[in-house]
Amino acid sequence: MPSARAKTNILLIWLVSILVVLPEAIVLDTRKHPIPLDTIYLTDCTYTWSESSTKIYQLFLVLFLYVAPFLLMAVAYYQIAKALWNKNIPGSSEMNHHPSRTTVSKQNGKNGATVRLIAANPSCEGQIQSRRKAAKMLIAVVVIFGLCYLPVHLLNALR
């Protein structure tokens, strides 16, 4: 059943994508640039509908294709990063009182007394470090998405 659900989601994504750009496919038209050269490189696309309709559509595109995904990613990745940043590693509390420490017993050679030393558990410390790296990577993905798509949507909105 997971493959059927995946296929349904893929189909839904394609349908929504087609519906979002369908207005441009219908109303865009090409025109030759005013420079008197006969070349196809100097043509541009123009909207055949009113300027107010163009502004509304561009605002919709910015909200639907940039702002909404950016906010959804930011909220979801923040929650994931917060959980990854947490020092409590599931399953390690049964072994020790502190998840990143281990207790080592050592017998003193002079009087035979047992000394309990608390040392850092390298596997837990490594796991914490890798989880924090993953959290930083998730934050970086959101920031890079925002920075890379901002110029495109800003130029389209200003155009």
Image (cartoon, grey):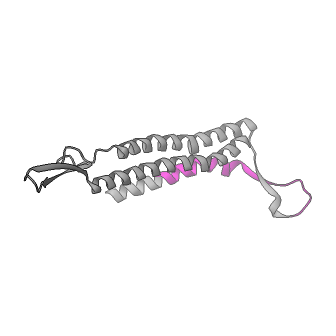
Residue 39 located left or right of residue 47: right
Q: Quadrant of residue 1?
A: bottom left
- Would residue 95 be visible to someone looking at this image? no
Number of numbered discs: 0
Q: Which residues are magenta?
A: 12-38
Residue 22 located left or right of residue 69: right
Give the vertical position of 86 relative to 30 (above or below).
above
Q: Give the residue at x 12% y 54%.
A: 108
User: Residue 30 appears at what percent x and percent y?
Assistant: 77, 54
Q: Quadrant of residue 66?
A: top right
Residue 17 located left or right of residue 43: left
- Would residue 101 be visible to someone looking at this image? yes
Residue 129 inside the magenta-drawn segment: no
From this viewpoint, which residue is outermost toward the right?
Answer: 36
Give the vertical position of 7 relative to 132 (above or below).
below
Q: Give the residue at x 36% y 57%.
A: 4
User: Which quadrant would the C terminus be assigned to in this image?
Assistant: top right
User: Residue 138 appears at what percent x and percent y?
Assistant: 46, 49
User: Residue 54 appears at what percent x and percent y?
Assistant: 71, 40
Q: Give the residue at x 11% y 57%.
A: 109
User: Residue 104 appears at what percent x and percent y?
Assistant: 17, 53
Residue 34 inside the magenta-drawn segment: yes
Q: Give the residue at x 8% y 50%.
A: 113
Q: Nearer the viewer, residue 17 or 81?
A: 81
From this viewpoint, which residue is outermost toward the bottom?
Answer: 39
Give the vertical position of 19 relative to 3 (above or below).
above
